[in-house]
Image: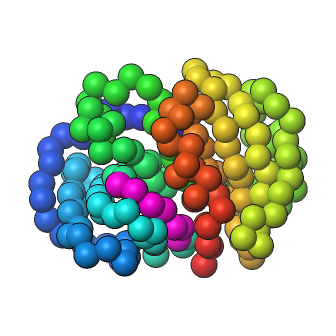
Amino acid sequence: MAGCNNNSVEEELFSTPQNTNTQTSSSTSAQEEEIISKDQQTTDELDVSENSTYQNQELGFSFLYSGKYKFQESDEGITIWTKQDYEQIETFVEATPLTLSYAENPINLSLTEWVKESGFLLETEITEQTVSGLDTVRFQWSGMWSYTSVVISVPDSNQVIIITLDNDMTEYQPIFEEIVNSLKVF
């Protein structure tokens, strides 16, 4: 979940990905799209100063963000990078800075119980919140590094969305909060 497989980045090609994921912006700048591996993982970079919307039809969510980021997609979710970090991805020794992924909650535990049962090494108490009309919990935990995660219950589903921030990567804090506060699940 919080790790990064730097070996999966084998080549970079410029082309248009064949998926239904979209980004929209009120900015007039061009969108650059790249296919970065044999697995057809895509990253999209949009240079905007105003709010933009990232939407992933396959995984069923969207969120607002501002700034210039790269979105590395996989079957498990997305990893969000600043351009500078993305350009150094092959030598990146930190855990992935910001991820958004899905996990199963097959017996529909409460979010607090799900976190406790999932084996997170908690550093703080679990705080229950409602964000954008969705039930969420927020907590800090440790692994190889210290993380903050927000877990969101997906309505009418046995799944949860986990948004995880590497606490050492403070430059990602603003987009982490933007995602948490604007996430829409469909």
Q: Main secondary structure of the magenta part?
A: strand
Q: Is residue 57 visible?
A: yes
Determine the residue positioned at 14% across, 65% down. Answer: 15
Determine the residue positioned at 45% across, 53% down. Answer: 78
Determine the residue positioned at 82% across, 31% down. Answer: 124
Residue 148 is situated, as x and y percent measured from the top left of the image, at: 67, 38
Front-most of 145 and 167? Answer: 167
In-image side of 113 versus 63 (left or right): right
* Residue 120 on the magenta span: no
* Residue 64 on the magenta span: yes
Q: Quadrant of residue 154?
A: bottom right
Q: Is residue 3 visible?
A: no
Work out which residue is located at the far front of the displayed protein and give it.
49
In-image side of 2 versus 135 (left or right): left
Residue 131 is situated, as x and y percent measured from the top left of the image, at: 75, 64
The quarter in which the N terminus is drawn is: top right
Residue 41 is situated, as x and y percent measured from the top left of the image, at: 31, 55
Q: How many marks overall?
A: 0
Q: Which residues are magenta?
A: 62-68
Q: Quadrant of residue 89?
A: top left
In-image side of 111 versus 51 (left or right): right
The quarter in which the C terminus is drawn is: bottom right
Determine the residue positioned at 15% across, 48% down. Answer: 12
Front-most of 100 and 87? Answer: 87
